[in-house]
Image (cartoon, rainbow, N blue to C red):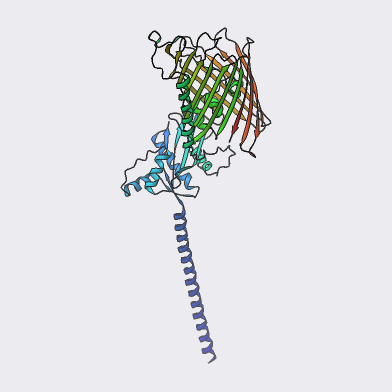
Amino acid sequence: MVLFTDATMKREQMNHNKNEHLLKTIFSKSILVCIIAFSAVFAQDSTESKISLGVLKLETAGMSVKSSLALSASLRNALLSTNLYKVYNHTKIQALLTQTKQELSLECFSPECVMELGERLGLDKIIFGCVDKNREYHEIILTMVDIKSKRVEKSSNIKKSVASITTDSLLRLTVMRMHNMDTLKTKSVPADPETHNAKKLFYTSGLCMGLGLLLAAVDGGLFDLNLSKQFDTFSLSDISSSIFQLPFFARPAALGDGYIAGSNDAYGVLYNPAGTAWAKGPEVALGYQYGYSMLNNFSVSYVDKAAKKVGFGQCLLYSADVDNLQRDIYFISALSYKFTRLYPLPWPASIGVSVKLGTTNSPESENATASQKTFCGGLDFGLFMPINDNISFAAVLNDAPGLRKVNNTTTEIRYLEYEPIRFNLGGTFQTGHTDYNTFIIYQGQIPLYDDQHWHLSGGIEQELFRVIKLRLGLKKIAYADSPWLITGGFSLKVNTESIAAKYLILDGSYQYNTLVVFPSLNISFRVGF
């Protein structure tokens, strides 16, 4: 009886252990299945929550088709490594187009084209760019467009020597830098802010050109169309005699008056219209020049951004001698557009045009041999290229065309005189340091006619204590009897953010002539808002 009981208890214990083991197995497997299910759901939710990013095929220069496709694949992998996007490469985008039965070109190299493509495909963002490679360096430019907000969200431009890094590694570095994931200490360049000042552009340009035309009609004899037959057109020389040979603002004057490559401020409206696209914001400049012991010259200019890539500026010049024998008044309106990349060049650039309307008036007086009213007009075309953070290049074609309509009110003779075209090239070099900043500028006028001469100018600017700048410059016309013009000046910058303006800059300059004649003194103010 005891043995039967013990055997029964053992069997019951064994059955209980089996059931307990079976329950544990079932429970473990259930937990595992739940974990796998939740993981799959979470992974699916995580994938669906990622930003859909379309990657267009990179535009390449100096590379084979095979290398281009390999770089596009590397771009996709680099973007996937950020763990931010659900990436659609060129093949997937083409499949989407086929699926939705849309015929769109994937050869997009501008934000406007990319935005239209992204809206059609229902993507959140699209990235596009170009790769340029030669024997010395390779450069990668990437731009990411946000389709919903219709703006350029990120951009990066890196240029390295071929010896220092491979193109594939440079591409990955560019992607990482776009997302602030690189460990290199580099100077960050903020993107251009969105700007909507089209009304300001139209109002200021309309006012400037309207006043110029009004003055030309009243004081310049613009609409006196009957020309004297013996003096239908008249041209004495290919050397310009306009007041634009004078330095109206103190900073350009102190640097030898070669300022076309430093024209991204209010002073530059007078020198190179293409520089207005690079203005950081609204800025006003006021200038006065006491020149040659007999001239009083006044100038006012204004520069601003009309849109993200569009800059504009207006300028008023007034020049008169102390005896009031002649008076010159000019109105200048400048407009420029910035290109992210001006093909075939691998760097950004801007082009611009300025319209000049003015009058030269010699009133009747006992000291004047004749009185006359002259209408002056012309177009200037400019190019401005910041090659990198330190170097910029510029070119300007002045008076292309330019003319003067002369109305001699004493003799009633009227004729046209064409201003000679002038062509200038220039550049700048700037280096920064913790304690100082050095700026070097140069310019040369290239002769286009037999009786034109080379005009060479340049200067150096040294920053001290972040608020003071000292300047020294030289200017020379390349023929034997011309004097050297030695220029110098200073600058003082005051932070005025606590009041209406952001900053106030006072500039002064003096020009010394080696013939010890015709000295000039300039003073000007530049105010940023």
Q: Residue 17's x, y, as percent?
A: 51, 78
Q: Residue 108's x, y, as percent?
A: 39, 38
Please give left or right for residue 319 compared with residue 88 in the image: right
Please give left or right for residue 492 compared with residue 150 in the image: right
Relative to 14, residue 174 above or below: above
Relative to 445, residue 300 above or below: below
Q: Quadrant of the C terminus?
A: top right
Q: Quadrant of residue 390?
A: top right
Q: Residue 118's x, y, as percent?
A: 40, 45
Residue extending farthest bottom: 1
Along the viewing direction, whichever of 422 and 173 lies nearer the viewer: 422
Is residue 92 in sight in this rendering? no
Along the viewing direction, whichever of 433 and 59 lies nearer the viewer: 433
Please give left or right for residue 171 compared with residue 108 in the image: right
Q: Quadrant of residue 115?
A: top left
Residue extending farthest left: 101
Along the viewing direction, whichever of 16 and 271 lies nearer the viewer: 271
Residue at the spot 47% in from the left edge and 40% down from the top edge: 143
Residue at the spot 48% in from the left edge and 26% down from the top edge: 211
